[in-house]
């Protein structure tokens, strides 16, 4: 058994779509398993979603930093936290329209938090430091963002077909090949995950700028902030209104 990690990230990226989908399906099953196992026993008193609570905490800390390194301070001062606040507020309103389920979420499904059993070819989720009740779409959308790794190579972001294969196993983990998940359910989860994906691109950049000031780890957290936040600005250009209208149509079709 070993950490998937970036040293062995071929399971997620290099070996192609089949291996990526296989890993994703395994993770979907593991996510469902640990939620059933932990639901009601962990954080039993805190079943409110923590995304926006934690994001506000990060924001308040991130916008009041002072760097000893003058070069870092100059770069830090180029960040418009007023803009970040506005974007987060608008995104919170948008995601609120989705009525996304609240589940026990890992919230940090990057490859370093996955262990692979080589004999069983089965992934196991580890490190629940950020675990809490949260929106289902955030946990899934955040996981898809992590395909890019710390290099932020978003060409590795999973295609819609790859995502829907994972959604089928997530929504019907017992008999995914026998009981077909409806197209409406797949489309609704696709809209949900890829809208909350944007929240991940605000949440972790704020975390990164704090780490740039506080962490002793030799990593360019400031560059990571800009890579993630710029990707948010790029992806938000996808007509969010269309996502909203599409979800409304799907919701009506269930009535």
Image (cartoon, helix red, strand yellow):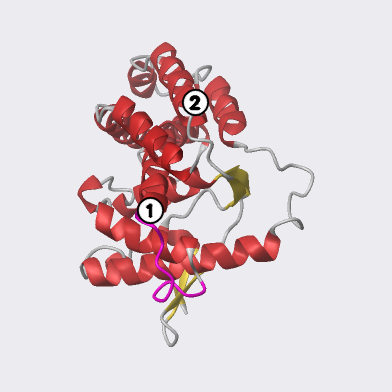
- Residue assigned mark 1: 186
Asked which secondary structure carries label 2, the reply is helix
Q: Which residues are magenta?
A: 174-183
Q: Which residue is nearer to you in this view: 70 or 185?
A: 185
Q: Name the image quarter holding residue 5.
A: bottom left
In the rendered image, residue 226, in percent from the top left (x then y), is placed at 31, 30
- Residue assigned mark 2: 92
| Mark 1 vs mark 2, CA separation in Å | 23 Å
Asked which secondary structure carries label 1, the reply is helix
Residue 64 appears in view: yes
Q: Which residue is nearer to you in this view: 181 or 27?
A: 181
Q: Residues within 10 Å of mark 1 (few under 14, many from 20)?
A: some
Determine the residue located farthest toward the bottom in the rendered image.
119
Residue at figure coordinates x 43%, y 88% from the top left: 119
Tag 1 near tag 2, CB within 8 Å = no
Determine the residue located farthest toward the right in the rendered image.
45
Of the image marks 1 and 2, the number of the one nearer the N terminus: 2
Residue at figure coordinates x 27%, y 52% from the top left: 160
In the rendered image, residue 84, in percent from the top left (x then y), is placed at 41, 19
């Amino acid at each position: 058994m070993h950490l998937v990690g970036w040293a062995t990230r071929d399971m997620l990226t290099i070996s192609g779509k089949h291996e990526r989908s296989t890993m994703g399906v395994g993770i979907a099953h593991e996510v469902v398993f640990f939620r059933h196992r932990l639901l009601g026993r962990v954080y039993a008193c805190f079943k409110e979603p923590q995304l926006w609570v934690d994001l506000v905490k990060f924001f308040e800390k991130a916008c009041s930093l002072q760097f000893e390194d003058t070069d870092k301070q100059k770069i830090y001062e180029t960040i418009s936290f007023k803009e970040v606040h506005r974007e987060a507020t608008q995104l919170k309103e948008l995601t609120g329209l989705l009525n996304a389920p609240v589940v026990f979420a890992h919230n940090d499904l990057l490859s370093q938090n996955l262990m692979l059993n080589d004999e069983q070819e089965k992934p196991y989720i580890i490190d629940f430091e950020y675990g809490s009740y949260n929106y289902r779409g955030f946990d899934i959308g955040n996981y898809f963002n992590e395909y890019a790794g710390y290099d932020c190579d978003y060409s590795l972001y999973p295609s819609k077909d790859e995502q829907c294969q994972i959604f089928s196993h997530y929504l019907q983990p017992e008999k995914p090949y026998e009981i077909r998940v409806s197209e409406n359910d797949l489309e609704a989860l696709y809209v949900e995950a890829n809208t909350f994906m944007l929240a991940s691109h605000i949440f972790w950049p704020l975390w990164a700028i704090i780490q740039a000031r506080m962490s002793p780890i030799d990593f360019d957290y400031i560059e990571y902030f800009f890579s993630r936040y710029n990707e948010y600005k790029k992806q938000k250009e996808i007509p969010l209104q269309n996502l909203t209208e599409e979800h409304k149509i799907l919701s009506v079709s269930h009535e």
